[in-house]
Amino acid sequence: MKTLLISFIALASAAAEPSCPKGHHWTPWYDRDNPGGTGDWETLVHLRMENPGSICEMPKSIEARLVHNQQPWNPALEIAQMSPLTGFICKNKDQKDKYCQDYEVRFCCPNGPSCPNGHHWTSWYDRDNPSGTGDWETLSHLRMENPGFICKKPNSIEARLVLNQQPWNSAQEVAQMSPLTGFVCKNADQNDKYCQDYEVRFCCPGDPPCPKGYYWTKYYDRDDPSVTGDYETLADLRKERPYDNICAKPYNVQARLVSNKAPWQTAGENKIQIDKDIGFVCRIKDQPDRRCHDYEARFCCRTLA
């Protein structure tokens, strides 16, 4: 009776296609367990511990699929428990052949995509315009065109409109996005047969790179987090430090807390703006506690010949 009840719940919960509404995004696929021992346990609590900062506390929905062929989990073939707040569990003892297949899961989380401690966001890249077949911001081409700046296996990806910096899904266009392939909007898939122009960035392990032929400037702390926030901007630093020769077009930017020199992400602040062309900005109005920490920033510049 218990097995039948579990099966009924699974069938009911999987009847509708999992949705990820506007203002949310799908995480990457995760496969933390193999179906040895008691089964395949893709539990949210363990996935969040093993991928710190990558999965939100309260996912909106969950999707599960087979690892070997990417086909959706079929409750008519294998009995499992699935919930966005607990994850996915397939127990060997509940199956007719006493063995589960191997599954992977992903979760629908509020925007934007997260970049956990020990990782960094790359700069924004816009390599293509939506002429021809569409807008192709592919990882393979971006890595070739920006050698040394984008890791091989990003943790997550974010895309936005070039026109107004709004999230890509605000345009309500059909697109494909993955941290391992990039972002593709095909003109043929749109109602008006034309894509808007997008730019992307990737979350990569470690500190922002400054490859051979470039150098890091020293760290600058030009502002204190009073009134509106902490503004460590490139334009202001270049104006205030004319003799420091801070380059006009840096190839990367890095920021950290003044108090303990820890990466800026460790402060857990909301809606931080960090970009090689802008610098680093924390706005008080964006923070739940209405205060910013004090930060300092440095820039990766080309070595002068």
Image (cartoon, rainbow, N blue to C red):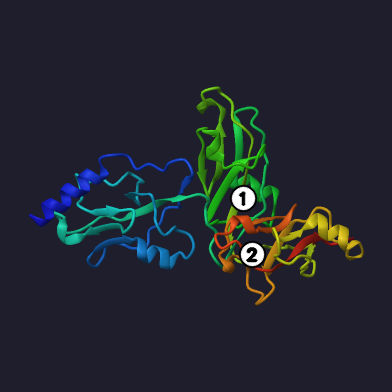
Residue 33 sits in quarter = bottom left
Single out the residue that lies furthest toward the front. 227
Q: Secondary structure at mark 1?
A: strand
Could you classify mark 2 by the number of other residues whose Cα lies within 10 Å: few (under 14), some (14-19), or many (20 or more)? many
Please report the residue visible at 42 percent of the width from the left and 68 percent of the height from the top. Answer: 49
Please report the residue visible at 45 percent of the width from the left and 52 percent of the height from the top. Answer: 27
Q: Nearer the viewer, mark 2 or mark 1?
A: 2
Please report the residue visible at 36 percent of the width from the left and 65 percent of the height from the top. Answer: 45
**First of labels 2, 1 by sequence position:** 1
Single out the residue that lies furthest toward the left. 1
Give the total of numbered labels.
2
Could you classify mark 1 by the number of other residues whose Cα lies within 10 Å: few (under 14), some (14-19), or many (20 or more)? many
Q: Secondary structure at mark 2?
A: loop
Amino acid type at image mark 1: Arg
* Residue that numbered label 2 is attached to: 292
Looking at the image, residue 2 sits to the left or right of residue 75; the answer is: left
Q: As displayed, is residue 182 above or below residue 293?
A: above
* Residue that numbered label 1 is attached to: 201
